Amino acid sequence: MKHLTYLAIFVLVFVACKEEQKQEEQPKVPEFDGISQNIKPGDNFFAHVNKQWYDNAVIADDQVGVGSYMFLNIPQRELLEDILENAAAGEHTKGSIEQKLGDFYASGMDTVQINKRGFEPIKPMLDKIEKINDAPSLMRLVSEEQKNGHASIIGLYISADQENSQLNIMHAVQAGLGLPDRDYYFGTDDETVAIQKAYKEYLSTLLELTNEADPSQKANIVYTIEKKLAEAHKTRVERRKIEENYNKYSLGQIKEMHPNLQWDLQFETLGLAVDSVDMKQPAYYDALDKMVGEIPLQDWKTYLKASTLSYYADYLSKPFEEASFEYSKALTGQSKQQTREQAMVKQVDGLLGFALGQLYTKQHFNEEAKKRALELVNNFQKAFEARMDNLDWMSDSTKVKAKEKLYAITKKIGYPDVWREYDVEINRDQYFENVLKLERNDFDYMAAQLNKAPDKDRWGTTPSTVTAYYNASLNEIVFPAGILQFPYFDVNADDAVNYGGIGMVIGHEFTHAFDDRGAQFDKDGNVKNWWTDDDLKNFKAKTQLIIDRYGEFTVLDSLHINGATTVGENVADNGGISIAYDAFKLTKQGQDTTKIGGYSPDQRFFMSIARIWRVKTRDEFLRTYINTNSHSPAIWRVNGPLMNSTPFYDAFNVQPGDSNYKSVEERIKIW
């Protein structure tokens, strides 16, 4: 089923200075306007800086939120739309990236042709499902669909072996659900029940649109199967335990464990030479094997039809697209569909993102930003090393290992050194077929890595995407071009603004190498204990303090953050601010006290932190975000870490009695 996940990644946007701008011009200093002086910084610093903006910000009907973070992708897509419109309007050499981008975009914009075809493009798939007559043919079809990006009941991917990071192997994860998380199937509160109802109606509508008899009854069959699968799913908290989610078996072992799943037939269908599998959640596949043997084949056909229709709904005619949107409304609160242009920008970025990224970086990326960002990243390593030296809870022997890992981190900024190529023929009048070709190209791109060393030139996000990430298996941090923009980064801003903006994000990503999960990987990307017993005990005790503290925080009056599922991001937020502050204090401005706009350098640093999390969302989206995302909501990405920051207390004279005041003993310090 279609997973509506809201993965939260760190978001930055770049406003490039014009090339002709003379170096001797005075930098343009971003001002901090709309400060609510009636709200004390120590009571609610997020509101102190952002409340006036928040009260006046309007969420467009076709959006789930507004502001920075992931919502900076909204103006970013306008830039990408211009690129694609120009590509579609021009004449280009067959096979060029401009031709592929322009023709794919144009094929998706031809809604007259798409609507005329109805569900005709997907009929061959539905016919194949109807011809299933036993477990082998069931699993063969599931595997064929894997090549099209549709996982259904089997979730496979290829990446490094966590015990041998120099080799890519096959991994299998739990799958099969259409709701965002397994917990949605068991919730009894009004909001969750409403989502369950909307999902069942969505399944029924899809089946009805393809002329299935008794669509509501069949939707219930699908939901019952999914709920049974959900019972075997691990929770989000359980999935954070790295060692418990690594279970490597030989092909012979899993064939014996799961005779109904036809593992050898699956890999033969996929064209892959698999001799072992890291089964992340074996209990799921144990349950699935049993269900394949017990549930009537006709019910499985119904399930696969609904799953297939849901996966491809947005590529079909308007009734399917509208059904998909109606379901998403229950999760997000969004009242109006986005324009076709914006929908297609996301499709192109998802399927031809590195081709689009080449044009984006040529037109909108300032190479000076890449140079400055790399300087910052290098400075942050030095600041982090100094903080490690001063830790009072870690032994010298563990500090040596930690610093070895810190300086082994690979830094990727802007765009790949080697661009991905797309060996696909794109036709201007075949949108659905283009999607299938590109999905298969993605599968082939992944499959080519099996049983090889990881390709360190590959990126896990496209250059135009507003995000940043740390990859533990490769021990790398990545900042795409889309991330290097205001309010996070401005080549003309003073250091306080940049160190509080992108600086927090850089520090955050570095800290991920040493959060509750990252700390279990060594400098080479292997899961290996490099800690002394006492140091590891101290570290776990400190992370538990973060879990407990954040579990007290609420949004929407009484909805608590899950401290256990967000602990990695919260540790990174706390560490990120501390590292960024220390790095800032190494700069000339950081050692000065000269005010700009009435605020000291330290005050501007912390105000910049608050400003980068200037976000307003719909309540429905925020509720889904809390239930599914590993990040805390924006307000607590500001107020939570600053409770623990003594320099913040000093900068704004936070005193006992202030709502967010914590005594020195209560301030949590890990990194």
Image (cartoon, rainbow, N blue to C red):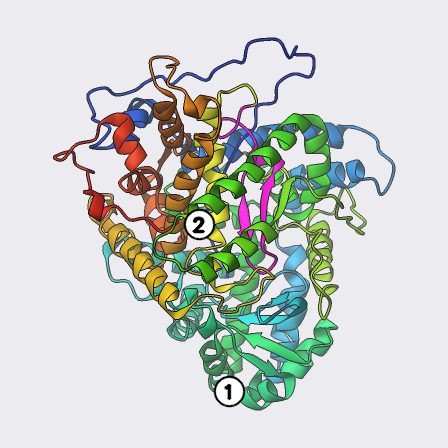
The magenta segment is: 466-490
Q: Position of residue 41 (x, y in %)?
A: 24, 28
Q: Is residue 214 above or below residue 209?
A: below
Please, what is the three-letter code of the amino acid marked with disc 1?
Gly
Circle 1 sits on which residue? Answer: 293
Q: Nearer the viewer, residue 439 or 560?
A: 560
Q: Nearer the viewer, residue 272 or 222?
A: 272
Q: Residue at x 49, y 27 (%)?
A: 587
Q: CA distance from mark 1 to mark 2?
A: 55 Å
Please tell me how crowded label 2 is: few (under 14), some (14-19), or many (20+) other residues with Cα within 10 Å.
Answer: many
Q: Is residue 6 above or below residue 654?
A: below
Q: Position of residue 511 (x, y in %)?
A: 46, 49
Question: Residue farthest to the bottom?
Answer: 256
Q: Is residue 390 magenta?
A: no
Circle 2 sits on which residue? Answer: 388
Question: Residue farthest to the right?
Answer: 93
Residue 643 horizontal side relative to residue 536, left or right = left
Please, what is the three-letter code of the amino acid marked with disc 2?
Met
Tell me, for residue 172, which label it has, or none.
none
